[in-house]
Amino acid sequence: MANTAAVNFLREHKARYPLEILQRQLRAQGYPEAVVAESVKVAYGGAKPGTPQGNYSGGFFNIRRPLVYATGGLKIWDFIAGLMLGGAMSFIQLVGQEIFFYDFELYGVLTLLAVRVVLLVFLFRTRRWMMFGLLAASVLAFSSLVRPIFQLLAFGYYY
């Protein structure tokens, strides 16, 4: 059974010291090997220490460090979020072109294209599957087959 003091010690120091040093310190304090092993399991969440886990503090909007996908479900959710982000950007572009017509064409398209490229580069480093979804949505948005569908859904007509 894990000792709460040993678990707290491991959780407190695991970011600064390697596991081997922490285990050696616990043994030096007089904890039996079974207690040390169980405390390591509890403190490190059942995974082998040093291996990244898919869940990390900060939730969906944490962009400070890359997400390591633990399951395929996380990849699917990020891909869908990227598709929705790309679809929203395409819809904004379509509405802007419809309202402002020629004025929006040059500046609006180039601005949204620049935003897409910056997002793709940023998401490549932090949320790779969201980047794949945004890339797929961008390719679909510039496709001549999908544009009429967007216009029909948004305005009820296609010209």
Image (cartoon, rainbow, N blue to C red):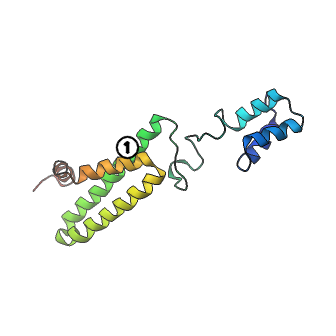
Amino acid type for the residue under numbered disc 1:
Ile
Residue 26: which quarter of the image? top right
Q: Using the image, determine if residue 126 lies above or below residue 6.
A: below
Towards the viewer: 88 or 54: 54
- Which residue lies at the image location 41% right of the left edge and 45% below the top edge? 129
Q: Image quadrant for the C terminus?
A: bottom left
Question: Can I make out residue 8 in this image?
Answer: no
- Which residue lies at the image location 31% right of the left edge and 63% below the top edge? 112
- Name the spot of residue 75 as percent of width and height, x first: 44, 40
Towards the viewer: 88 or 15: 15
Residue 56: which quarter of the image? top right
Please, which residue is most extreme toward the right here? 30
Element on which disc 1 rests: helix
Left or right for 135, reference 28: left
Q: Using the image, determine if residue 120 lies above or below residue 29.
A: below
The residue wearing badge 1 is: 80
Towards the viewer: 21 or 39: 21
- Name the spot of residue 142 as percent of width and height, x first: 22, 54
- Name the spot of residue 131 as percent of width and height, x first: 39, 50
Left or right for 141, reference 67: left
* Count of numbered circles in the view: 1
Left or right for 115, reference 5: left
